[in-house]
Structure formats: C-alpha cells, structure tokens
C-alpha cells in the first residue's frame, strides 16, 4: 500500500502533466449582447498551477468598451472565481478582446474555469460556440 502511494506522489511530482487537464476550453453564448460587435477574442489561459491544484470557479467580469477604438477602456471583476490566479487570467484575456469602433458597453461577461481530462470530448452548450484557445 505504501509503495503505491509513494509511486503516485513521485509520478505527480516528476510528471505533473499526467495529473492535470491538458488544455482549457471556453464557450460563449451566441446571442450574448457583448458578441454583437466583437472582432477578436480568446479564451483565458488556464494557468498551470491552477490546473495542478485543481482550481475551478465561475466569475463575472464587466468590460467597458472605448467606442472610439473598440478596445476595453476598463475591465473589472464583479464576482470572483474564488481564485486570484484564475481572476487574473480572465482579466488579462478580456483586456485583449476587441470590438468594432462605435460599440457601446459596458458588458457583463461570465467566465468559468473547469477541468476535464479531455476537453475536446464534450459538445458546446446549446446556443453557444467555442472560443479560440489562448496563445498564452
């Protein structure tokens, strides 16, 4: 019994990628108000340490768009995911989103971080589409 526990611990330390999800997947509702003028977006990165520690959570973030250039003028957290590392990742990703100039907000955007052994196995929720993977 002890040998199994020790080998599992050593495997988790030496090969942590075997213990965590390989990537994250994000979906957004097709009819959400913020999707109307959205030109470019990406899913928030799922930080390795958050995956390693199995951090999961749902948060809501408000993005105020600058109508002159379509860039976020302000991004604030309305409801935390429960983990600062996940909140920071969501805030960073939302700051990179771009809307058509003239788009007016603010928009409340829900973000959920969930772990799955195979993120490609599931279908998108009804009425939503997959966001591109974060390059970070």
Image (cartoon, helix red, strand yellow):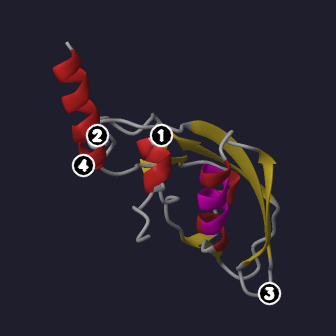
Give the quadrant of residue 35: bottom right
Q: Position of residue 95 (x, y in %)?
A: 66, 71
Between the residue at mark 2 and the residue at mark 1, the CA separation in whole angstroms equals: 11 Å
Residue that carries the numbered disc 1 in the rendered image? 53
Residue that carries the numbered disc 4 in the rendered image? 14
- On the question of residue 35 being in view, the answer is no
- On the question of residue 16 being in view, the answer is yes
Q: Position of residue 8 (x, y in %)?
A: 23, 30
Residue span colored magenta = 86-92
Which type of secondary structure does the marked residue at label 4 adopt? helix
User: How many numbered dots are placed on residues in this image?
Assistant: 4
Q: Residue at x 39, y 39 (%)?
A: 124
Q: Which mark is residue 68?
A: 3
Between the residue at mark 3 and the residue at mark 2, the CA separation in whole angstroms equals: 49 Å
- In magenta segment, residue 88: yes
User: In this view of the protein, which residue sits in the foreground, 82 or 12?
Assistant: 12
């Amino acid at each position: 019994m002890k040998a199994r526990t020790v080998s599992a611990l050593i495997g988790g330390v030496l090969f942590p990628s075997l213990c965590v999800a390989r990537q994250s997947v994000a979906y957004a509702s097709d009819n959400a108000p913020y999707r109307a003028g959205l030109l470019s977006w990406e899913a928030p990165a799922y930080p390795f340490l958050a995956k390693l520690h199995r951090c999961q959570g749902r948060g809501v973030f408000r993005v105020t768009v600058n109508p002159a250039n379509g860039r976020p003028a302000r991004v604030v957290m309305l409801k935390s995911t429960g983990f600062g590392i996940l909140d920071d990742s969501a805030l960073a990703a939302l700051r990179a989103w771009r809307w058509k100039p003239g788009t007016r907000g603010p928009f409340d955007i829900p973000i959920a971080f969930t772990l799955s052994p195979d993120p490609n196995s599931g279908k998108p929720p009804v009425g939503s589409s997959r966001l591109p993977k974060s390059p970070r």
